[in-house]
Image (spheres, rainbow, N blue to C red):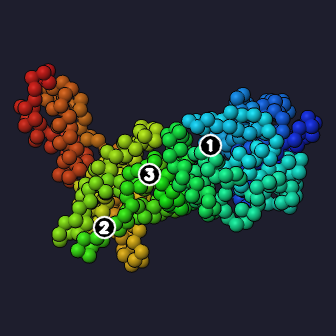
Amino acid sequence: MNIDKIFKTINKLSKKEKTPVYVVGGFVRDLLLGLEQKQDIDFVVVGSGIEFAKKLDEEFDHVGSLVEFVDFDTARYVIQVPSSKFQVSSPTIELEFAGARSEKYDADSRKPKVVGASLEEDLSRRDFTVNAMAVDVRNTKTTKGTKSELDGIVFTEKDVVDPYGGQQDLKNKLLRTPLDPDITFSDDPLRMLRAARFAAQLGFAIEANTCMAMERNVERLKIISAERIQEELFKLLSAEKPGIGLQILYDTGLLHKFLPEVADLHGSEEVFGQQHKNVLQHTFKVVDNLATRTDNVVLRLAGLLHDIGKPQTKKFVRGRGWTFDMHEHLGKKMVSIIGRRLRLSVPQIKYLAKLVRWHQQPIALMDEGITDSAVRRLIVNLGDQLSDLLALCRSDITTGNPIKKEKRLKNYDRLEKRIAEVIEKDKMRAFQSPYRGEEIMQECGLKPGPTVGKIKKALEEAILDGVIPNEYEATKKYFFEIKDEFVKNAEGWERV
């Protein structure tokens, strides 16, 4: 199943049922921009969206899964696309069919009351003019079998139903609402976050009146669930240059509503002629730097949160200048609060907390004379997240001085080389004391308890500090040297 066959079948069914069907939204926008065709496609049916989707399912001999949203006369049809042997999972094509409708909103909810409407009325409820264009499926053509390099869908500009000037706004690279932006954003405040996201993804500017309406409607964001805000934030962070959208969120006051800790990073102070950098601007640059290194959106979020402990730890110390001592420890605690607020998963919160906590550590390991034990500790504490931490640390270099930047990046090259050497030497990736807890209990006559844990930790500390090699016999010998001191202090209930 491919896009060509899908459009041909919808076209055929549309004519058979005498039911006009229009492809709308991002699919039309991206085709006009010459961007890659998306695998999720929205259609407006001048009739019943659900009934048309049911008939399409029959045409496809029920190859997809159909989900109905009766209150909105909308159906989602998901088709699994056969994957190659190199893919972990099969990709999907998601088709959404909605009956042409208008929407009315209650003040305290973003869930609309839906009534049937014309195509033009349906397009008016879209978020931006560039997403408020439609093309009758009967006017589309497929490129399969032509000289086109890729199979897909084509249409001409004259085939576009464009009542709100979306094509001109595309040419001007402008985001503008079809109707009064205050109404558009008040009805569905999530659209304000989408404006910032599209600005970052497409490199578009937001029309002045639309932008001012975002500022006027920031309080409406309170009716949006944390899950929806998280989803939009992740989409924004997935952009090629997330900093563009993040700056818009700050400038309009939206960032203050769901990430006040990040908004508080703005500003700089001067004492005795010494001024610290604007941490907010630095943070946005860090996120953009990370975007060039990784597609991991949670790692990009770590870049956004890595310095959130700075405002509360900022001090001016004579002889040192501006300091932010222990900000990484405070930041770790703040990440847990933010993560719960945004409904992040427990693994995501733990991942973020670890990176924020340790992001300063590699800086202390830059000296060429650094000991193996310090490198070992970094390896053990970070585990599988070590490469992500180093990507964050490299992205944390935002100096405009090219000589200074090159020097700091070379320091990280040197550190990564040392890490590789220590890993190869000690095979520390899955580090544990080779002398195990069962043997400790047997030799010491102890039950499971804190004393056994203390002995095991002492053995591991000795290996990390380079006192003994990470080998069984050497660890066993060291165990017999230290065990008596621990056993004599064991509680009575721990003894066998």
With 419 as the anchor, is 93 left or right in this view? right
With 234 as the anchor, is 77 left or right in this view? right
At label 2, which amino acid type do we have? Glu
Residue 352 vertical placement versus 148 (above, below): above
Marking on residue 256: 3
Give the residue displayed 79% in from the left and 60% down from the top.
149
**Residue 298 at least partly seen:** yes
> Could you tell me residue 250's position as x and y percent?
47, 57
Give the residue displayed 20% in from the left and 46% down from the top.
461
Q: Which residue is mark 2?
A: 269
Q: Quadrant of the C terminus?
A: top left
Distance, label 3 to label 1, CA atoms, is 21 Å
At label 1, which amino acid type do we have? Asp
Q: Residues within 10 Å of mark 1 (few under 14, many from 20)?
A: many
Q: Nearer the viewer, mark 2 or mark 1?
A: 1
Distance, label 2 to label 1, CA atoms, is 40 Å
> Could you tell me residue 385's position as x and y percent?
40, 50
- Residue 122, picture quadrant: top right
Give the residue displayed 31% in from the left and 57% down from the top.
310
**Residue 387 at least partly seen:** no
> Could you tell me residue 495's position as x and y percent?
12, 23
Marking on residue 187: 1
Of 323 and 265, the residue lying toward us = 265
At label 3, which amino acid type do we have? His
Precedes in sequence: disc 3 or disc 2: 3
Precedes in sequence: disc 2 or disc 1: 1
**Element type at mark 2:** loop
Of 98 and 427, the residue lying toward us = 98
Q: Quadrant of the N terminus?
A: top right
> Could you tell me residue 118's position as x and y percent?
82, 42
Q: Residues within 10 Å of mark 2 (few under 14, many from 20)?
A: few
